[in-house]
């Protein structure tokens, strides 16, 4: 973002935990961002802090089915977790083509498990910066990882400018309903 020319603006898209990353970018670089789309993404804001949405995600994945919390980077580093194939099949890719699930199970990697304290310190959002950017939220109605009710809670506590619901979409909407997502992203970017 720092290398983006002053006269150029971008639309950020964040999926799942990527919502935290685009939220931080929105706070740091509001003048360079013309819009942000949270696709079944964690969407904190001035009225719902980052640690609250992060805890919800952690509760959805930790110790479920065959997911594992490990110290993959050694005992002196934060723990990591890995999503298991059964969890991916029943909670993340359950509406997606079987080929996408098969590929995902071969590509899955450990993810750092950040502390709630770290998330709270790193992601502090203001109405003046974060709140000045046009936002949209894509609700994935068949999502079993970030359930519809939690997605709706985030949009109620931190209302975006637009909410798009996609019927039949699991958490990996770019696989389960790619055309619907693509059409919405194009329309949002054109505004």
Image (cartoon, rainbow, N blue to C red):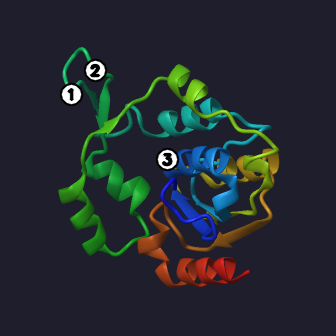
Total labels: the figure holds: 3
**Marks 3 and 1, the one that precedes in the sequence:** 3
**Residue 145: x, y in percent?**
50, 50
Task: Let me know if residue 142 appears in the view.
Answer: no
Q: Nearer the viewer, residue 77 or 97?
A: 77
Please give left or right for residue 86 compared with residue 113 in the image: left
Q: Give the alpha-carbon distance from disc 2 to disc 1, as whole Å.
A: 6 Å
Q: Splitting the image into 4 quarters, where does residue 31 fall?
A: bottom right
Q: Which mark is residue 77?
A: 2
Q: Residue at x 31, y 44 (%)?
A: 83
Q: Residue at x 63, y 35 (%)?
A: 50
Q: Splitting the image into 4 quarters, where does residue 75 fall?
A: top left
Please give left or right for residue 115 compared with residue 126 in the image: left
Query: Is disc 2 surrounded by few (<14), some (14 to 19) or many (20+) residues within 10 Å?
Result: few
Q: Which mark is residue 17?
A: 3
**Residue 60: x, y in percent?**
49, 39
Marks 2 & 1, CB-CB < 8 Å contact:
yes
**Residue 153: x, y in percent?**
74, 47
Please give left or right for residue 158 compared with residue 76 in the image: right
Q: Secondary structure at mark 1?
A: loop
- Where 4 falls versus 112 (above or below)? below
Q: Residue at x 49, y 51 (%)?
A: 18
Q: Give the alpha-carbon distance from disc 3 to disc 1, as whole Å.
A: 20 Å
Q: Nearer the viewer, residue 94 or 16?
A: 16
Q: Nearer the viewer, residue 104 or 114?
A: 114
Residue marked by disc 1: 73
């Amino acid at each position: 973002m720092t290398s983006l020319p002053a006269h150029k603006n971008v639309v950020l898209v964040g999926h799942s935990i990527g919502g935290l990353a685009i939220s931080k970018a929105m706070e740091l670089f509001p003048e360079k961002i013309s819009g942000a789309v949270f696709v079944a993404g964690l969407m904190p804001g001035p009225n719902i802090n980052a640690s609250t949405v992060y805890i919800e995600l952690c509760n959805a994945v930790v110790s479920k089915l065959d997911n594992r919390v490990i110290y993959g980077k050694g005992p002196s580093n934060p723990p990591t977790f890995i999503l298991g194939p059964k969890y991916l099949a029943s909670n993340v890719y359950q509406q997606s083509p079987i080929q996408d699930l098969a590929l995902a199970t071969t590509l899955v990697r450990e993810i750092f498990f950040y502390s709630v304290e770290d998330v709270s310190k790193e992601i502090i959002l203001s109405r003046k910066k974060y709140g000045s950017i046009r936002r949209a939220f894509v609700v994935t109605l068949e999502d079993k990882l970030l359930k519809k009710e939690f997605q709706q809670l985030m949009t109620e506590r931190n209302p975006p400018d637009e909410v798009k619901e996609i019927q039949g979409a699991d958490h990996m909407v770019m696989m389960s309903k790619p055309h619907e997502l693509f059409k919405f992203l194009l329309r949002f970017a054109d505004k």
